[in-house]
Amino acid sequence: METRILNYFLTVAKLGTISAAARALHIAQPTMSRQIQQLEEQLGTPLFIRERRRMVLTKAGLAYQLRVEQILAELDHANQLVATINNNELTGKVRIGCVESSITKFLMPLLNKFHHQHPQVTYELFAADGDLIKNYLDRGNLEIGIVSTPINAAKYHYVRLPIDDRWGIAVTQDSPFRNQKVIKINEIKDHPLIIPSRSLVYDEISNWLKEAEQGLKIVATYNLLANGAYLASSEIGNLVCIEGAPLPPAANLTFIPLFPKRKLEHYLIWRKGISISEPAQQLINLLRSR
């Protein structure tokens, strides 16, 4: 089966319509439709349900999408490997997922150094929370992840990075906390909170508050910091976040660290038992040496 057909399938799955996929790939819509139909006939099962002009993946389609993404990622790695075997110049693309935190100040100078050492290597940077980064690593969409605690790293090689961050509360200028240097855990009792949506973070914050013999009063969760910040600026609640994550200036929030200090660590992770490209391996070697 041609990889071209697999890319057709993934594009339809992503965009949701034959017409949108055809436009994105610059091919005729009837050609796209025919190729998808032939793929389904070859596999002997429908991959999509046609609903009101939308192409919705079936259960088989969802499973096929995951495997196809992994296969194409592996093929891309193999192509990069072959391209560099007989070439002294390191080439290829490194796909990196990184959380939003102070770790970016550590990462960017190292990427700059790596770029000057290997100018033919390009980068695909993906900002997300740790759960989504691990999901993309599992699917082969990323090769390297930089995540923060709490983490479950059983499936990954991991290296502790020399950067910590600290948890705190971002508050508006009208907040009664705005002039404090720190906020004690028991001071946020009964105050509405906006917290990260990661389940592991929720559990950790719950444990902090249990220590203070109080419960969580959550009014909202967020996966993108900017959304959480603007919710907080509208005075819906106090934003639980880390100091190194960049708050949007327009939100006009003040970060106040928690006391006792609640530390967040950072880890470099990559999948066990999965081959990665030579540029990714070389970058891992650089990062783990710091």
Image: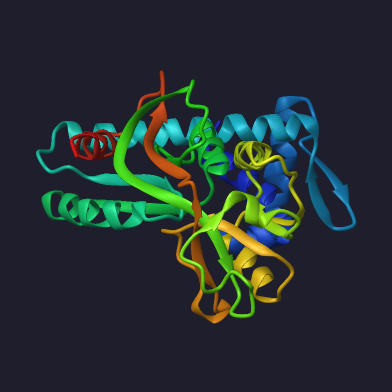
Q: Residue at x 79, y 50 (%)?
A: 55
Query: Along the line of sight, which residue is nearer the eye, 87 or 66?
Result: 66
Query: Residue 3 placed where, x, y %?
Result: 51, 38
Quarter of the rendering occupied by the N terminus: top right
Query: Horizontal and vertical percent for residue 222?
Result: 66, 56
- Tell me the quadrant of the picture where the C terminus can be found: top left
**Residue lying farthest top?**
273
Q: How is the image coloured?
A: rainbow
Residue 120 is situated, as x and y percent measured from the top left of the image, at 20, 52
Residue at (33% x, 52% y) in the render: 123
Q: Quadrant of residue 279?
A: top left
Q: Nearer the viewer, residue 194 or 182?
A: 182
Percent across and percent down for residue 248 are 51, 73
Relative height, residue 127 to residue 283 (above, below) = below
| Relative to 281, residue 171 above or below | below
Q: Is residue 222 visible?
A: no
Looking at the image, residue 104 lies above or below residue 76 = below
Q: Is residue 242 left or right of residue 11?
A: left
Is residue 60 among what the camera can see?
A: yes
- Identify which residue, 132 or 85, lies in the foreground: 132
Identity of the residue drawn at 77% across and 25% down: 44
